[in-house]
Image: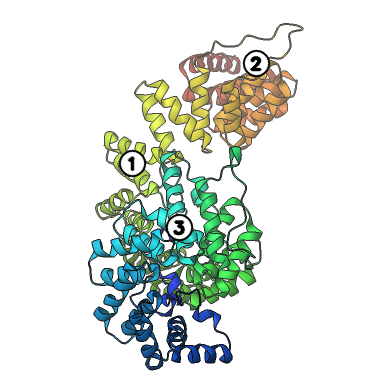
Amino acid sequence: MEFMGDRATLLETGRFVQRHAGNVADGTSSAVAADNVDGAGSGGSADSVETAGAEARHRRAAESGDTASMSVLGALLLRRGDLDGAEPYLRAATAEGERAAANNLGVLLHQRGYADEAAGWWRIAAVAGSAAAAHALGRHFRERGDEPAAEYWLRQSAEQGHALGAYALADLLEHRSDVGAERWLRAAAEQGHREAAYRLARALERRAAEEARAGGDMGLVLGRTENAARVQAQGRAGGGDAVPAVGAPSATSATSGVGGAGAAGALASAVPAPLAGGEGGELSVLDEAAQWYQQAAARGHQRAALHLGAILEKRGELKEAGRWYLTSAKDGEARAACALGFLLRDAGDEESAAVWWLRAAQDGDGNAANALGALHAARGEQQTAERWYRAAMDAGDVNGAYNLGLLCAAQDRTPQAEQWYRRAAYAGHREAANALAVLLLQAGDATGAEPWFSKAAEAGSVDAAFNLGILYVGRDDDRTALSWYERAAAAGHTEAALQVGIALLRDGDEQAAERHLRCAAGGGSAEAAFRLATVLDSRQPPPGPPALGEPMAEKSECEEWYERAAEQGHRRAQVRVGMLAATRGDMADAARWYREAAEAGSRNGAFNLGLLLAREGNEREAALWWARAARAGHGRAALRLALLAARRGELTEGQRWCARAVELGPAEVAERAARLRDALHQELTA
């Protein structure tokens, strides 16, 4: 059980505020600002009037009755904020039929609070073909809840190529979950609309995630698995996440934190540079999303830079990811600062990571506060760690309460640990619910533990499902236990797959058992590898001794599984590998495996090693291993020691080992040992 961050889910939660930039071009705010101001219909523009001399010329021309100059001068004054000065010129130009002036007059009136009168002038301009007016009118109707009218006018604006109109139409369609939204987001983004590029990228990234889920491949979308970028724990709560059970080692849960780093300079072009595509040069959906993120980020969109950094980090392009994270973090994005901290931590620079985590935590990022807590916990600074976990909790990150529970449990402060686990569990933290259940079970409260295990398992905790299996086994309810084991095994829990395999073997379903044992063995379970090997071993005929001149046979699959289990320290597997090696005639390898097993406490390994040593003439060492095996309960080893003592004339010692062999058995050994004991007794009394 590890100190928990929120890396895997942070970018998918959508909990962060969808802030729009101050520029109207990047949002759909209710206010119609100067970005909707049109220039003169003659081709003049307020933006082109850069000098006082030009303004003076337009003013003279306007006073002489030039309609275009009236419109341009009115637009210039409107942009400057001189509403009183702009209004007479705009009204005069509008009276002469100037389309741009009608739109700008609507803007002016809207700024003064006369929304209905503004809409009237926008309608006049829009009917005359003004895309900016159609956009403003569409937004006016949307603010009033008239979506059909809003869609009509926004579509008029968008179809004329107006970027703001296309974006506002896309926003309206997306609000209604209309698939046509993407088309208009793309149209706006292609014209350089920053927020449209960002939202288009988000839509494409979501689509890539859905495709990956449907195809069973989350690696592309989620990037580094939960095992990467963890906030490492320094202790375990309650001995682990899983209830200890024979043949079922406790499982540990892993939770992840935000990861990543970086920042990039602005691009020279608004259009993103081409990325490497797949076969035939085609871009994947995620590649296209990255391009649009890049376009938005190059225009200063801090959240786009954050998401671009995340995609690049998932691809392993850490340097580029770091550059974009840095850009976003410097612009004030706390999550990017947190991600940059994880990237630096993974690169071994904990001090720099702590600087960025501190910056993010001070800006209210709970995940960064959790990371700082884990960092201080790793250094043994428990009080500082607790302070940061509390800060994470205050920032709304439920992982803070969970981590406080872990911290208290590691210090044997069980009541406090239970308190924090409960707080996190009530907030929906599944691993906290599992940890709380483990704590209650260890205190002997199985009744109180069960509902928390169930709640955690239903929420998706694989460890909790496995623990429920163990709980029901303890109640002799094997059927219910198996159902929970199967659920955990389906989610990839190694020990659960082993338990399912054992149950299926017991029921005689060898094929299904083999499938589960392979999963568990592939997941690193030595017991599963051994049991899989025994299943495969039972299907093949016993090998005979190699003939003279015959090459040594290749190792079978079952022997490879025996070896895998043996290399993990499985004593029975080590003995079996030694026996197979002896059958092949490889006595050195056999002796090596027997010795490893014997030194680990295997009585069969000690007995077999003694046999090999005796055959080599080293009866003294053989006797030492037989004695170890006999003391561990091996009847045949005791009989061998009795025979060895009898040959040496140590009759009393022989009788003692005979009595031990009779006691240990099996029946055949006990019978032989009894006869030998009687013979030794007669020899002693003769």
Say which residue label 1 marks. 469
Which residue in the protein does label 2 denote?
Answer: 583
Image point (60%, 60%), residue name:
321
Relative to 500, say whether 52 is above or below.
Answer: below
- Quarter of the image holding residue 99? bottom left
Does dot 3 land on a helix, a strand or a loop? Answer: helix
The residue located at (49%, 75%) in the rendering is: 361
Instruction: Return the disc, 1 or 3, that comes first in the chain's sequence.
Output: 3
Please report whichever mark, 2 or 3, sits nearer to the chain's N-terminal start.
3
Where residue 672 sits in the image (x, y, percent)?
53, 14
Residue toward you, 623 or 283: 283
Q: Mark 3 points at which residue?
A: 187
Left or right of 539 on screen, residue 352: right
* Residue 154 in view of the camera: yes
Residue that extends furthest to the top in the rendered view of this protein:
548
Q: How many marks?
A: 3
Task: Name the residue furthest front.
Answer: 64
Circle 3 residues within 10 Å: few <14, some 14–19, many ≥20: many
Task: Label 2, secondary structure: give it.
Answer: helix
Distance from Cα at disc 2 to Cα at disc 3: 74 Å
Number of the front mark, 1 or 3: 3
Quadrant in which the C terminus appears = top right
Q: Where is residue 74 in the image (x, y as percent from the top left)?
A: 43, 86
